[in-house]
Amino acid sequence: MKLGGNDLCWCGSQNKYKNCHAEFDSRIEFYKTHGHIVPPINIIKTTEQIAGIRESGKINIAVLDYIAENIHAGITTEEINQLVYEKTIEFGAAPAQLGYEGFPKSVCTSINEQVCHGIPSKDVILKSGDIINVDVSTIYQGYFSDSSRMFCIGDVCEKKRSLIRIVQECIDLGLRKVKPWGFLGDMGQAIHEHAVKNGYSVVKEIGGHGIGLEFHEEPWVGYTSKKKTEMLMVPGMVFTIEPMINVGTDEIFLDKKNGWTFYTADGQPSAQEEIMVLVTSYGYEVLAH
Ligand code: MF3
Ligand code: CO
């Protein structure tokens, strides 16, 4: 579909295309003809959609804040699941994970050598020394949000604490590369370099994703990519930065019994945090962490 200059812009602004996104579209077209991967128009959010995703993100943050206040040694991951479910419902929202492709719970709880997608259970009791990723996602008025944090339970050894510190530094460094007309690979390389420089490895097979109108949208977002490669970043794109970083090998395996949970192949700890970020006309806005 080709819009004429006097047609209404596709973005919903009610302005003429020539005074709105025409220049933006031809800039994207330029990158495309020069061999770059460019975002399809349907993942570029309108102002109204961004406002909705922002509200969803606020709930996601509040639910994680609530978990931060209540997590402790002795709690079961099923109790965390209950807290996430109840708090999300209290906000008039729904947990995006519940029933997603058959996922049985409202949250992922991944402990120590679990890389991601740990399933809450009444048989899993947190104990001093554990590190845990709590990964929450929300649907609010049709808009999706997704973010996760690491928590230290009681007395945690320096090895695990520094792993978490590096994950957080990686995300900060990656975030600084998020700007319009940059590439997702700029962010991926920054994360990978910082992890490797500190002696860690980065999981290759599992990545982040576009998000907003669906839970998982284009693009797939990796953290071992190279600068100036992968998708062009443009204002209005929303995606997650959620690297999984391992103390030992980057190799992982899937728990065949539940079909969801990934573990490190060598049994060494893994950590992950997840932020949801919007590309703006000047840089970025974190919509959830
Ligand atoms: N928050 C996770 C992600 O980043 C959720 C995975 S889907 C689930 O995509 F079903 F496992 F929850
Ligand atoms: Co995610």
Image (tube, rainbow, N blue to C red):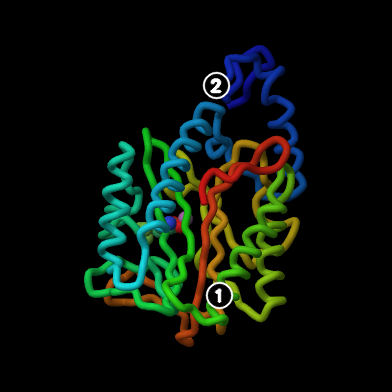
Of the residues shown, which amino acid type is indicated by label 1? Answer: Arg
Q: Is residue 137 left or right of residue 201?
A: left
Task: Indicate the secondary structure of the residue bearing disc 2.
Answer: loop
How many circles with numbers are drawn on the protein? Answer: 2
Of the residues shown, which amino acid type is indicated by label 2? Answer: Gly
Indicate whether 199 appears above or below 57. below
Asked whether the residues under the numbered discs 1 and 2 touch, taking CB atoms below 8 Å apart as contact, a structural biologist would say: no
Q: Quadrant of residue 187?
A: bottom right
Determine the quadrant in which ligand 1 lies: bottom left
Q: Is residue 104 left or right of residue 35?
A: left
Question: Which residue is the site of mark 1?
Answer: 161
Residue 110: x and y in percent read 40, 69
Indicate whether 215 appears above or below 131. above
Furthest residue toward top = 6
| Front in this rendered view, residue 205 or 202 | 202
Residue 277: x and y in percent read 58, 46
| Front in this rendered view, residue 70 or 29 | 70
Number of residues whose C-alpha sits closer than 10 Å to that of mark 1, classed few (under 14), some (14–19) or many (20 or more): some
Q: Is residue 106 left or right of residue 21?
A: left
Residue at x 69% of width, y 16% of height? 5
Of marks 1 and 2, which one's residue comes earlier in the chain?
A: 2
Question: Which residue is the site of mark 2?
Answer: 12
Residue at x 50% of width, y 37% of height? 54
The residue mark sitting in front, 1 or 2, is: 1
Residue at x 29% of width, y 74% of height? 125
Task: Indicate the secondary structure of the residue bearing disc 1.
Answer: helix
Furthest residue toward left = 122
